[in-house]
Amino acid sequence: MRSLIGILDLSTEEIDALIRVAEDIIANPDAYREKCKGKKLATLFFEPSTRTRLSFEAAMYELGGNVLGFSEATSSSVAKGESVADTIRTVNCYADIIAMRHPKEGAPLVASAKSQVPVINAGDGGHNHPTQTLTDLLTIHREKGRLCDLTVGFCGDLKFGRTVHSLIEALSRYTGIRIVLISPDELRLPEYMQNKLGSLDNVTFTETKNLEAAIPELDILYMTRVQKERFFNEADYIRLKDSYILTPEKLTGAKPDLSILHPLPRVNEISVAVDDDPRACYFRQALNGKFIRMALMLMLLDIQ
């Protein structure tokens, strides 16, 4: 029995295999309609979620299985003081696989240690969100046909963004990756991650504060929100916030085949005027999340 807590739990070969299965699901959906017949997914979401929870549920339903669970901690016995370990042991009685989101970092790891069924980390605080990373990788592969030899720009909150950290870690295991870090000084990629990147032979990275100047060289632009609450000085936020809003004008010099990704939810960091641009991939990205989660559940349940 195996769980998925962080993206580094998977080898690149396993990621590539998951992508192949997800793409086969897209091409041949009828072949997968009853793969999980009789199986039950428990969605244990101790904090709010839209895309992640619904995509897990849709994934299991499309595999012919069933779903049970809760969408907020107040709907569970946690509100009465029950521990994560006891919740997991109880849910083991009813479900074949668990998807868990929790505000405390490390909670899904604790859950996996107590569980007799696979546990999938659906996000734990600011720590890990491996299925979002798999979603991002599937999207890049479908848009570009490869996961190597790419120039990828990450823009916005690079300091606190768990999706940014996980995707950088995943991409850094492929060859020919060039990373462009686009952020204000207050939200730079943490030093420990920069040191990790600097130690790798197959990855190079540069930093800039200028989104518009960086765009022409990018194959992928991964946008995130610049979060007002992360600034100690509101004047700095006001000065910087519009620099990191993607508009059609800022895309003037971009490559015709640029792919724009965003883990969502979006606030105002991508203008709605960009949505109709064929290079905008973020809603296709949300759909891809369902397919890669289908592939992942098949793998963890050892269903061929």
Image (tube, grey):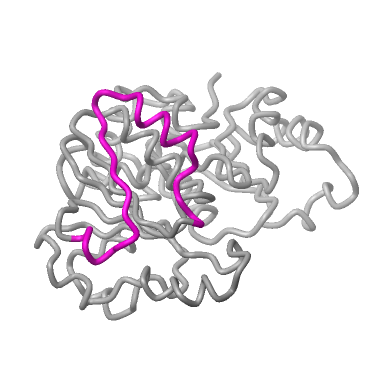
Whether residue 212 can be seen here:
yes
Rendering coords of residue 25 (x, y %): 28, 42
Residue found at x 14% / y 64%: 254
Rendering coords of residue 29 (x, y %): 28, 46
Residue found at x 51% / y 57%: 186
Q: What is the quadrant of residue 248 in the picture?
A: bottom left
Residue 19 lies left or right of residue 58; in this view the side is left
Whether residue 286 can be seen here:
no
Q: What is the quadrant of residue 23 in the picture?
A: top left
Residue found at x 49% / y 55%: 187
Residue 96 lies left or right of residue 91; in this view the side is left
Magenta stretch in the rendered image: 186-215
As drawn, 260 above or below 88: below
Residue 145 lies left or right of residue 232; in this view the side is left
Q: Quadrant of the N terminus?
A: top right
Query: Is residue 14 on the magenta stretch?
Result: no
Rendering coords of residue 16 (x, y %): 27, 29
Q: Nearer the viewer, residue 263 or 94?
A: 263
Q: Residue furthest bottom?
A: 273
As drawn, 8 above or below 181: above
Residue 133 lies left or right of residue 28; in this view the side is right
Q: How many marks?
A: 0
